[in-house]
Image: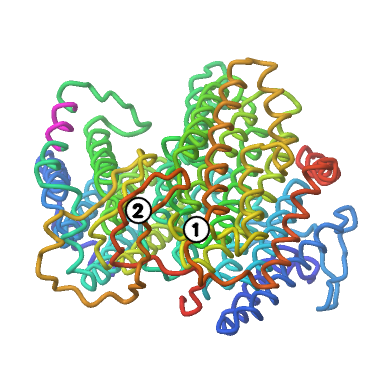
Amino acid sequence: MESLTAWLLATFTFFASGLGILTIAAVTVAMLLFWEWRTLLIGLCIIQLGMAVLVTRAYQVNLQWAQVQILVTLLSAGMLGLSARQIRFAIPYQRPGAWFVRVMAIALLLICWQLFDFDLALPTIVPPFTQIFLWLALCALIMLGLGDTPLFTGVALLLWFIPVQAFIQILLPEFRLFVLIGMVQLLTALACSYLMLTARLPVFESVAAPTDVAFSTGTAPRRALNAPSPLPPPLLSPPAQPASRLLPNGGTQAPLAPPIAGENPVAQRKAS
Amino acid sequence: MNAASGLLTLPALLVGSLISVALIVYLLRGWEVLAGLVAATFTGGVALWLLQLDLSNPLEPVPILGGVIDVSAPLTRLGFTFQLQPGASPILVTAFFMAAGAFLLTVAISQGRSFVPFTLILLAGYTAVTLMIAGPLAPPFLVPLFLVALNCIGIFILQAGRLTSPAGPLRTLVPSILAFPLFLVAYWYIDQIPLNPQDNSAQLMAARLLTLGLLLLLMPVPLHSAQPITAQTAPPVVTALVTLLYQLSLLHLLFRVVNPFPFVTQIGPFEPWMMWAGLATTVWGGIAAAGSNHPGRLWGYAALHDWGLIIMILAMPGLRTWPLALFLFGLRVVSMLTAAAGLSALEQHVGGMTPNRMQGAGNRLPWNSAAFLLGGLGLTGFPLSAGFTGHWTALQIIAENDWRLAAIVLFASVGAIWGFVRLTRVLFGPLENRLLLRERMVSVVLALCMLLLAISLAIAPQLLDGPIRSAWIAFSG
């Protein structure tokens, strides 16, 4: 493993140049733009490799750190990929709106980047590196803001971990600390993989919660209702009881659409 | 084991026994009643044992297992040192009592097979975090990282194998992952302070980072959405316990940051940021509760309203704030578990938590409906509920500084109370599902016990005086 890491770091020295930094930034933009699970996971691994090369070359960071980080990101991407493969029919319905929204978000980010001088001074980090760290962190935050599904949130959190891990390693070079962060990263990927499996059936119609303003509500496009369904049959679909009257004040409300995934009764004796 | 004396140490005993019981209970998970009873007996027993533990007498006999334990001896593993400090003892006792209460509730109403074993593992994690006194960095800077790991474990029990929207459990992860780097960078700045004691820029930066990190972890508005959505989709008892364990650990972390690093509150923006975040949280909790017709979501917003008030109290300078915050948290525990007991029975009987299914359910489940309503109202500070005295005292203290803030909080409380009044009309309105079964005797007994506890604290809040005083004495060393 150590020799493989050394070979990777020696082969991809390109990432330690200005063009390499731009490539890392471009890969992040491509991830946001395409929003496709394979692209996201491959992009994550490329960014991790690029950052490992960059930090080890520029700051003479321990090779073990790069080794652990590359391994952790590969394992995390593998876990998310395995779950994503199982729910690949549902993923297209989990996109946060049209591609135009994502293009606009990226355009807004680029305009803000040009107009406002993000003069954030990170201790011990030289300005070009500060810029790429900040770019990755902002892209992770935008990804978090756009997506509300386990896969995309998981990828966004892993993307957040990459600059954080590198920065912390430069700032506090402590072996146990980066191992600890790596373990937390793996646990995060595991939790997101589990949640992906529970959300494998797309929600065709969701009741908008007017009080939920913090995050966007991820709903599938309307056309999904008429599309030929390649989905497996719903596992649990208890017949919903449409109510003609919801409130005691005489107000009426249209019956709620039966949820595809079904809201199970509480006593999930079979749940594990 | 303590290498020096050859005796078993308390951290090893607590964490080791929790993991062992979790493994046993995992094997018994098919028999949920038995698993719940075993776990409740164990955690309740440990809580009682810790409560009567005399830290001045290091050698204590171990109940049931026999032998002697060195309660003051540290345990060092992988560079981390764990030891029972006086300030950690009330945190552990509260956590174990809360877990015992939640396990007891699962005896009557299933919360998913994974709940009991995974919660014991979660409790072992929180115990280790509470007992940690040294590590690669000082513990307050590492705790947020451990909280991320514990939140990851919490996700599995919050989702409970349900094929519902995972947004709630997922969102619990985000604030802690965003927050932990701030603590690590703050540690670096604090490390730089001795290099130039005349310059306070490092102190100021560390104070800002720590305040921002704490705020992210406290999940005020607009980072609050995990709490109401989790309450809407996850099993109620699980929601209550996981939320309370996390928030208890946060209170301990806050004390561990503010006490050794007083500059955080003195030169940084701690007070205004916390005050405004708390105010926004309590106001939004009240307004959103007024607009919620989903019982779970309403409960979540009421809990958010109460949490905002605790944040506001923690922001205020003075000697009275910490005992009051602990008092409010104690009442919060009782109110949340009472509401969870009632809501879980309602959910099980009507087959979900959607408002249309709840129509008239109170006619068939009066005791559990009363438990849910009284517990929920306790979170809003309604008179004659458990939370009333705490809210009233908090409002008085806030009004001493600025009466307008107290008036805004009171207005928000009215909003949350309005939400529960509307739900009461739904629950005790005309029954739609005539086939709805009456509540079972076991759940009636549990609801009655919780109601009795809540009403006792409502009419005699001085019952909490002793525990709060001893907790505060232990906290302040």
In the rendered structure, the answer to whether residue A119 lies left or right of residue B237 reads: left
Q: Is residue B457 visible?
A: yes
What residue is at 31 percent from the left and 67 percent from the top?
A261
Both labels 2 and 1 in a single chain: no
Q: Disc 2 or disc 1, which is closer to the eye?
A: 1
Residue at the image point whose x is 31% and y is 57% from the top: A256
Which residue is painted at 35% across and 53% down in the image? A62
Which amino acid, by three-letter code, is at mark 1? Answer: Met
Residue B469, given in percent of the width and then of the height, sits at 83, 40
Find disc 2 in the rendering and name its residue: A62
Q: Main secondary structure of the magenta part?
A: helix
Instruction: Report the disc number at residue B441.
Output: none
Is residue A155 covered in magenta?
no
Rendered location of residue B205, percent (x, y): 47, 25
**What numbered label is drawn on residue B358?**
1
Picture quadrant of residue A94: bottom left
Q: Which residues are magenta?
A: A106-112
> To which chain does the residue with label 1 belong?
B
